[in-house]
Amino acid sequence: MPAVAPARHDCSAAVGVTAAMAADRPPADRGQSRLDETAERAVRQVRDRSGQAGRIRARQWEIIVVISVQAGLAAAISALLAKQWLGPGSHVFAPAAAVGTIATAIGQRARRTFELLGGVALGIIIGDTLRFLLGSGPWQSGVVVALAIAAALLVAGKGGPLVGQAGGTAVLIATLAPMEGGLQVPRIFDALLGGAVGLVVVALLLPINPMRVLDRAATPIFAILCEQLGELARAMRARDSDRTMRVLERLRGTDDDLGRLHDALSGAEEVVTIAPARWHRRQQFHRYARSAGHLERLLLDSRALARWSTTALQYGEPLPPELADALDRMGRAVAEMRTECRAGKDPQRTRQLVQECAELAGRAGASHVRSFGESLVTGVRTAASDLLRAAGCEPDDANQVVRRSANAGQAKVRPPVRRRLRRALPTRAARARRRAHLAARTHNDGRAGRPARERPAR
């Protein structure tokens, strides 16, 4: 079969991109060095993650101690109350339900209690009904558990406390009910008592400080933003695309930190809702929650800035030094915002640094930048607006401040062209003088030997 000649494309853009890719391709003798760089990068990532895990573990010690004490206290109180109120017998499920309520994820305790009660009720209904219809035995127990799990999954839509309690209760009803009657009602009361005690301990006896939990969860995000924005600015000044790529990878590895921040927000919302001792923190919590949402957007904006700067350097686009200075100002503004917000001050210094950042972005946009440089300028302005919103500004005010500062920076590099003033209409005297001047010129031209043109009669 004859070989088919490849189609020729005359597109200059495709040729340019192909040449750029060929220039970026490492030669064969540098294969080992690239492999070494990849290995060093992997080792560096593992070291960074291990160090970050150690810092997170140290910050979580206080929360671990509080939750452990809450669980122990709830188990002791629920066991004592079950023995006093529910009569003789081994009320094992009351402390188990209390511990299960507290040991769940912070922010899901109230929902976890209702899921425990719902799972117990569902398991009792299905277990008793099927035991009455099918009898007792090994295969009957298997059918009861399978149908209880299926019904719980249909109700909940996913695995969780409701599914586990439905299956466990169905097992107890199918296996122990024939030998020991009266398990249904005590189990319901045990679950109710244990869940109620767990909520009381969380809300009244040992409520956590919601703002401290939020502050500890947001600390790594602030640290990463300050550090990596400064590193991105230094990498742009050095025109080192490998360093900007490392910044991008580090910013992409913050999903766990964002997940912990969301869990902390959920837990703090639960505490300020059900704990009377923390009700005075509600307004402060709502402010913090709004700021946290804009902080997450700022983190996503920083990822976009790292990605565009990497691509711009790889394509050899010119990047004005004002862009690196703007990123440096942004990192300082993030650190200043955290300091001022923790101290309860008005973030004036933060606004000043953000205005300087937007002004530098406007100056960079007025310079000779290309496509990815323009994307960087737009990204810096977007990040500056999100940072102002995180500091407490309203969206319209933040956009107006950034727009005004960026326009001022652009005007310093490229002053606006003044419009020419419209010439005033000539007056009647001016028109008369002009007619006299034209008549004199015509008379002089006639005296020079050229025939004078007669003016048309009016």
Image (tube, rainbow, N blue to C red):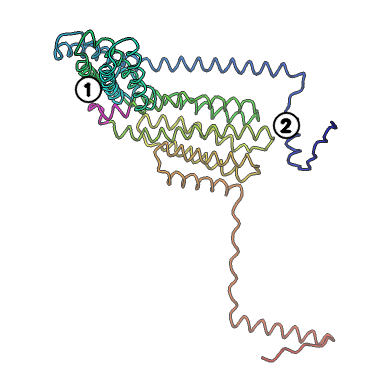
Q: How many marks?
A: 2
Rendered image quadrant of residue 275: top left
Q: CA distance from mark 2 to mark 1?
A: 64 Å
Which residue in the structure is indicated by mark 1? 204
Task: Out of 105 and 375, give the one closest to the viewer.
Answer: 105
Task: Out of 39 and 453, give the one closest to the viewer.
Answer: 39
Q: At 33% from the left edge and 35% from the top edge, which residue is drawn?
A: 286
Which residue in the structure is indicated by mark 2? 21
Label 1: how many Cα within 10 Å (few below 14, some 14–19, many 20+) = some
Q: Looking at the picture, how far across and down is residue 457, in whole percent? A: 69, 92
Placement of 100 over or under 455, stated as above or below: above
Secondary structure, mark 1, is helix
Quarter of the image with the C terminus is: bottom right
Q: Looking at the picture, how far across and down is residue 315, in whole percent? A: 69, 35
Quarter of the image with the N terminus is: top right
Q: Looking at the picture, how far across and down is residue 82, in whole percent? A: 18, 13
Task: Out of 86 and 42, give the one closest to the viewer.
Answer: 86
State the predominant SS element of the stretch in magenta.
helix
Are the residues at dot 2 and dot 1 in contact (C-beta closer than 8 Å)? no
Q: At 48% from the left edge and 26% from the top edge, which residue is drawn?
A: 255
* Left or right placement of residue 64 versus residue 237 in this view: left
Placement of 386 over or under 245, stated as above or below: below
Q: At 67% from the left edge and 81% from the top edge, which residue is drawn?
A: 434
User: In the rendered structure, which segment of residues is drawn in magenta?
Assistant: 268-280
Amino acid, disc 1: Leu
